[in-house]
Amino acid sequence: MKKYWLLAFAILFTIALTACSEDIPEAKEFQVKHNGQTLTVIPLYDRILDYTSEAKGKKKYEREDLYREKVVQPFQEMAEEKGIDIGSDYFAYFTGITDIDQLEKNTLELLQKQEEVQTLVEEAFMESAELLPGKDKAVFLMPINPDFTFPIEKMEGSTGVTFTEDFMLLQTDPSYAKSAVKNTVAHEYFHSVDMEHQTGRPTVFDSIIMEGKADSFTRIVYPDYTPPWTEPLTTAQKEKVFNELNGKLDSYDFEEYQNLFAGNPSKGIPLWSNYKIGFEIMQGYLASNPEMTPKEWVLTESKDTLENSSYKELLAPKE
């Protein structure tokens, strides 16, 4: 009799496991088309779950090797297969994660919400492409690293980065605000179109204006959404930031730019100073040129945005 009970238990256990696995939706790649332009959206949720299922209990170096095998390499192979230029600057966003359990939990939650995320991405792409057409694009979806709480706490659970004119990365936390996700997509989409026209390496000043342009674009697409990085600096803060920028605007030193992004309390440099200055400059430029459309001002040279700007004497790059 005992062996029959064991057999029955084994069957029930197998059924339970099967039922649980059936409750986990499959990550779905999809495309959005608008006026002849295509956005390909590729979730990496399944790859993340492949990683978390094997990473628990492993040592740090083992987890790093496993992450490369289960997440980074499949991502690279998918991009190559689809002819997507991903550049070489993405590695910092594909790193091993300490809190494996939380990563797995968040990924499963995002899989349950993927239809909602899909709708948000579709709407943001179509609304953005309507104002500023560009080439075909691809965006990869990932959960935010739960060890990295900054975008969860400060950016409403949504962040993104654009690496090439082809490739955007959208990272979300299950706690995301819908408006934040759409704003992120519009912001990164603008960067991708902007990159279609860029030549050469951007200076610190170029990078400041690039962010100001992207945030000015999202303000047009979503006028009711005001992210904290577009709030103006105080007069005292501007003075400290300008002192820090003195002689560095033409620099190609990325660390100088990162100091503006991250802030430096010891020097009185606020968080997101690069975004705040860039947005204010672009808002002034667009106020002086109200007839210009995004199709036109995406092509504007950084130095030309200082036309009629109160920042002109302070920030104009040296010729």
Image (cartoon, rainbow, N blue to C red):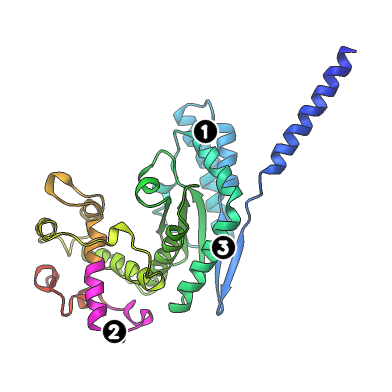
Rendering quarter of residue 36: bottom right
How much space separates mark 3 and mark 2, taking CA atoms? 32 Å
Question: What's the residue at 42%, 58% (across, down)?
Answer: 180
> Is 207 a magenta residue?
no
Front: mark 1 or 2: 2
Of 286 and 36, nearer the camera is 286
Q: Is residue 213 above or below residue 13?
A: below
How much space separates mark 1 and mark 2, taking CA atoms? 51 Å
Q: Badge 3 local density, few (<14 within 10 Å), some, or many (20+)?
A: few
Magenta part of the chain: 279-300
Q: Is residue 95 left or right of residue 268?
A: right
Mark 1 = which residue?
A: 101
Q: Secondary structure at mark 2?
A: loop
Q: Amino acid at mark 2?
A: Pro
| Mark number, residue 119 | 3
Q: Badge 1 local density, few (<14 within 10 Å), some, or many (20+)?
A: some
Q: Position of residue 214 (x, y in %)?
A: 34, 68
Question: What's the residue at 22%, 57% (across, down)?
Answer: 273
